Image (cartoon, grey):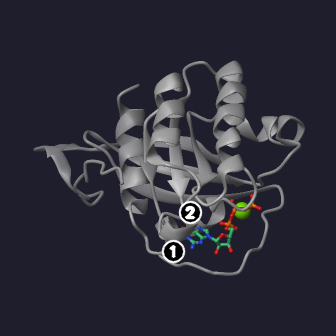
């Protein structure tokens, strides 16, 4: 299990220095990955702190919003939840425009979903070579059904120089860390 630094969660009224409020930055972040890996569930856990066992496939895109504190800035994240699937080359491209970052998710219980990490990374880097990326191995709670090892995901992550984290939208494990760490990484590019 990868443990990321847990950043502190200051409220948006906190002050970085006396008299100088944290500046707020709006950023578009897309969640991508094969169908049913848990993109919608990760956003639902993060934004509403809820989880649903039912699977309702996303059609098109759904946008959610949440503020996240990084070190010097507060990020007003616009999270674009995109439908996973085969025809992403055609369908998804138009949704990606203006995104400063993307979180690419695989399902640790289905080995084939690791292919999505590669495909989406290649597509995103083509569209925007400086885009901030993060790989996520989701469904970490289903330990007995695990088909993707830490080494599998670490290998692809190091190949593309993308950080990765293992999460469970069901238990909430590492979900807050994922988005906070992502905001901190985005801040590094400002
Ligand atoms: N056990 C477990 N189940 C999960 C987890 N995350 C999602 N699921 C389940 O996996 C199924 C698919 O989750 P979704 O969040 O809808 O997946 P998605 O990636 O948004 O799927 P598409 O919209 O079709 O691309 C649902 O039945 C969820 O309840 C998790 O961390 N653990
Ligand atoms: Mg979905």
At 78% from the left and 63% from the top, the residue drawn is: 58
At 71% from the left and 48% from the top, the residue drawn is: 112
Residue picked out by circle 1: 170
At 25% from the left and 53% from the top, the residue drawn is: 6
Query: Left or right: where does residue 58 sit relative to residue 149?
Result: right
Q: Which quarter of the figure has residue 28?
A: top right
Measured as percent of width and height from the top left, residue 61 is found at 76, 55
Foreground of the two, 178 or 76: 178
Image position of 63 with respect to 21: above or below: below
Q: Judge the density around disc 2: few (<14), some (14-19), many (≥20) Cα neighbours within 10 Å.
A: many
Q: Secondary structure at mark 2?
A: helix
User: Does the rendering let one see residue 41?
Assistant: yes
Disc sitting over residue 133 in the figure? none
Q: How many marks?
A: 2
Measured as percent of width and height from the top left, residue 41 is found at 60, 68
Foreground of the two, 168 or 188: 168
Residue labelled 1 has its Cβ within 8 Å of some atom of ligand 1: yes
At 70% from the left and 81% from the top, the residue drawn is: 54
User: Does the rendering let one see residue 142?
Assistant: no
Nearer to us: label 2 or label 1:
1
Query: Left or right: where does residue 98 sit relative to residue 43?
Result: right
Measured as percent of width and height from the top left, residue 20 is found at 19, 41
Q: Judge the density around disc 1: few (<14), some (14-19), many (≥20) Cα neighbours within 10 Å.
A: many
Q: Secondary structure at mark 1?
A: loop
Residue labelled 2 has its Cβ within 8 Å of some atom of ligand 1: no
| Image region (quadrant) for ligand 1 | bottom right
Residue picked out by circle 2: 43
Mark 2 vs 1, N-terminal side: 2
Q: Quadrant of the C terminus?
A: top left
Query: Left or right: where does residue 17 sit relative to residue 63?
Result: left
Alpha-carbon distance for marks 2 and 1?
11 Å
């Amino acid at each position: 299990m990868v443990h990321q630094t847990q950043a502190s969660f200051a409220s948006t009224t906190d002050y970085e220095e006396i008299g100088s409020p944290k500046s707020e930055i709006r950023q578009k972040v897309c969640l991508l990955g094969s169908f049913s890996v848990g993109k919608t569930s990760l956003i639902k856990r993060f934004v509403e702190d809820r989880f649903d066992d039912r699977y309702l496939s996303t059609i098109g895109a759904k946008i959610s919003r949440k503020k996240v504190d990084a070190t010097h800035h507060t990020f007003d994240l616009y999270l674009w939840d995109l439908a996973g699937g085969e025809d992403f080359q055609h369908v998804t491209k138009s949704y990606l425009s203006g995104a400063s970052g993307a979180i690419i998710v695989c399902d640790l219980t289905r080995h084939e979903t690791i292919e999505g990490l590669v495909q989406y990374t290649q597509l995103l880097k083509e569209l925007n070579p400086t885009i901030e990326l993060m790989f996520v191995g989701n469904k970490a709670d289903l330990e007995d059904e695990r088909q993707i090892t830490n080494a599998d995901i670490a290998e692809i992550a190091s190949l593309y120089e993308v950080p990765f984290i293992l999460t469970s939208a069901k238990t909430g494990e590492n979900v807050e860390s994922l988005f906070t760490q992502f905001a901190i990484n985005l801040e590094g590019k400002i």
